[in-house]
Image (cartoon, helix red, strand yellow):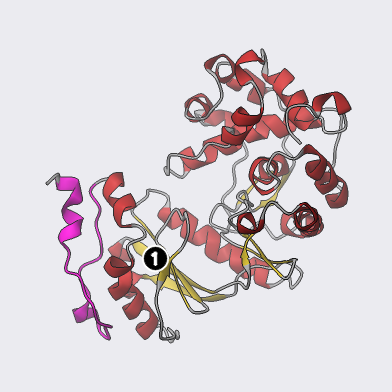
Amino acid sequence: MPRGWLVAQLPRQNRSVTSVSDVPPPPQFESREAFRAFKSDVEFWKPYIDITVADNGLTLRSGEVEAGFNSTYPTFIAGDLVIKFLGHLNAWRQVYDAERTALERVAADPDIPGPELLGHGFLLGDLDTGWAWLATRRMPGQALWRLLPDRALHERIAIALAEILPRIHALPPQDIPEIADWTAIDLTSANRNSSLPEHLVEQVPDYVRTLGPPDPAFINADIVANHVYVEGGNLTGILDWGDAVITDRHVELIQIYRDTLRCDRALFRTFLEVSQWPVGPDFPRKALGYALCRQGLRRIQNQGGGDVFEPIAEAYPLERIATLDELAEILFDVWSPASDSGSQ
């Protein structure tokens, strides 16, 4: 058996635990493959869930614990309680601090529907374990992607998000990570790991270098259909604030455009209008330029993976698009009828 999989030999526990002595040692994964293999393993994580609940005055209702869908970190749901464990990846401490702080800021604005933070800390109460945890109250409803296609619903949620976004961008920036200079990051390598063809990837450094002064704001940076919750046709919550960052507000747009709005240009136009987004002549260039930066965000967090251009590559013939400027006009000049041909 490869050494990287030895974590599988940690003792399994089919009972609730009530003291630290009942818990196996903090998990240590010797490879990213091992981490991913056990990330959503409820049986493996159940002892840590139980001790975290018992030691921190939380309530775990009887019933099955289920793993969160497509989460970066081990995340588990039991009744109305959600527990996320953050560790192993190099940026886990930064993500923990950012999400905890962001949830506290969101809670101070009743018009931003975010998860209620019920508790946070370090696994077994010890920073040296290399793991932290966050407990939140489960948001009502379902992830938006489970309810599509429903054009009327999609438009209603797009408008609701657009109305909320300016409040998110106005949240206090203190103690949130900041990225002021994207040119210091290897965006070429990051975008080479996307669906962009090589001839466009080679243009990335010069393109980003000429974006002009940033327009910084507090951004969530990951408003995707899996993080937008809906019940009864209404927006009930925006989940997952671990990518929160202070940077140019245009970094926010690519995840909304390509995932939440499914590259629907008409919906995106409505979203921009309702949010009163500051659209100038250089908007398409900024929207694409900061999409290239968003592709680099996971590299900063050392999480790997992720491709913000994957659905775009399915909708448009990227190999036949000569320049990034041309791609910017096709994707983000949403007021131009001539560009509506590649997607909805």
* Residue 271, image x, y percentages: 81, 48
Report the residue at 73% width, 71% height from top.
Answer: 232
Q: Is label 1 in a helix, a strand or a loop?
A: strand
* Amino acid tagged 1: Ala
Residue 294: within the magenta? Answer: no
Most common secondary structure along the magenta stretch: loop
Label 1 neighbour load within 10 Å: few <14, some 14-19, many 20+:
many
Where residue 268 sits: x, y (%)?
A: 78, 43
The picture places residue 89, in percent across and down from the top left corner, at 37, 50
Q: Residue at x 16, y 68 (%)?
A: 11
The quadrant where residue 24 appears: bottom left
Q: Residue at x 36, y 57 (%)?
A: 87
Name the quadrant of the C terminus: top right
Magenta part of the chain: 3-30
Residue to which mark 1 is pinned: 132
Residue ranking furthest to the front: 149
Residue 7 is one of the magenta-drawn residues: yes
Residue 97 x %, y %:
50, 61
Please state which of residues 124 and 180 is positioned toward the viewer in this rendering.
124
The total number of labels drawn is 1
Q: Can residue 112 be seen in the rendering of this structure? A: yes
Tell me: 131 left or right of 135.
left
Compared with 320, 6 (above or below) is below
Instruction: Using the rendered view, name the quadrant where residue 45 is placed.
Output: bottom left
Query: From where the camera sits, is residue 85 visible?
Result: no
Say whether residue 179 is left or right of residue 323: left
Q: Residue at x 42, y 83 (%)?
A: 60
Residue furthest left as drawn = 1
Depicted 219 relative to depicted 18: above or below = above
